């Protein structure tokens, strides 16, 4: 991982074998990012992606292995119990341009991954909603 800050945005390059979510989390910890917007593109050969089932209130994930482009990586950074909390979705595209996507919990870089993290002033927390079954955003009073 290598990154630099340009005004309000960190520009990060991930290299083969690096895991995307953990790397973004490490940058947030290191730089004290509490609120931000994540966007990226790149190529991966492993990913774990899924969806939240609103009936069972559980995440269901699938592991993917193959040659994929990250057609889009999009998400946000907030905090939960004072620590950076990432919520990131991705659309991957495989051979023939077939795309699929979901809630991204893990992705391993195959060639390169280019992530921009725009930092915002302020802080938005999260706490668990029994009704929804997720850690939802909570705004400061
Ligand atoms: Zn999600």
Image: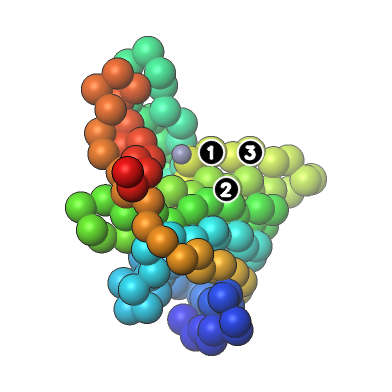
* Residue 43 showing in the rendered view: no
**Element at badge 1?**
strand
For the C terminus, the image quarter is top left
Name the residue nearer the viewer: 64 or 106.
Answer: 106
Q: CA distance from mark 1 to mark 3?
A: 7 Å
**Contact flag, marks 1 and 2 (Cβ < 8 Å):** yes
Name the residue nearer the viewer: 23 or 75.
Answer: 75
Residue 42: give x, y in percent of width and height. 64, 65
Q: Which residue position holds label 1? A: 102
Q: Which residue position holds label 2? A: 90
Up-down relation of residue 70 to residue 102 (above or below): below
Q: Is 120 on the left or on the right of 106, as rendered?
A: right
Residue drawn 45% across the image and 72% down it? 17
Up-down relation of residue 42 to residue 15 (above or below): above
Q: Residues within 10 Å of mark 3 (few under 14, many from 20)?
A: few
Name the residue nearer the viewer: 58 or 137.
Answer: 137
Q: Is 79 on the left or on the right of 10, as rendered?
A: left
Residue 37: give x, y in percent of width and height. 54, 59
Q: CA distance from mark 3 to mark 2?
A: 8 Å
Who comes first in sequence, dot 3 or dot 2?
Answer: 2
Up-down relation of residue 114 to residue 129 (above or below): below
**Element at badge 3?**
strand
**Contact flag, marks 1 and 3 (Cβ < 8 Å):** yes
Q: Is mark 1 within 8 Å of ligand 1?
A: yes
Total labels drawn:
3
Q: Which residue position holds label 3? A: 100
Name the residue nearer the viewer: 18 or 55.
Answer: 55
Q: Residue furthest right?
A: 96
Residue drawn 51% across the image and 68% down it? 119
**Contact flag, marks 3 and 2 (Cβ < 8 Å):** no
Q: How is the image coloured?
A: rainbow
């Amino acid at each position: 991982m290598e990154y630099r800050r340009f005004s309000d945005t960190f520009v990060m390059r991930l290299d083969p074998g690096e895991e995307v979510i953990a790397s973004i989390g490490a940058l947030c910890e290191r730089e004290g990012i509490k609120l931000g917007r994540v966007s990226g593109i790149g190529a991966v050969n492993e990913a774990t992606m899924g969806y939240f089932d609103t009936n069972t209130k559980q995440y269901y994930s699938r592991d993917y292995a193959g040659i994929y482009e990250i057609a889009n990586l999009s998400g946000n950074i907030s905090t939960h119990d004072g620590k950076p909390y990432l919520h990131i979705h991705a659309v991957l595209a495989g051979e023939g341009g077939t795309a699929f996507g979901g809630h991204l919990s893990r992705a391993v870089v195959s060639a390169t991954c280019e992530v921009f993290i725009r930092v915002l002033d302020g802080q938005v927390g999260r706490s668990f909603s029994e009704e929804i079954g997720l850690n939802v955003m909570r705004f400061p009073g």
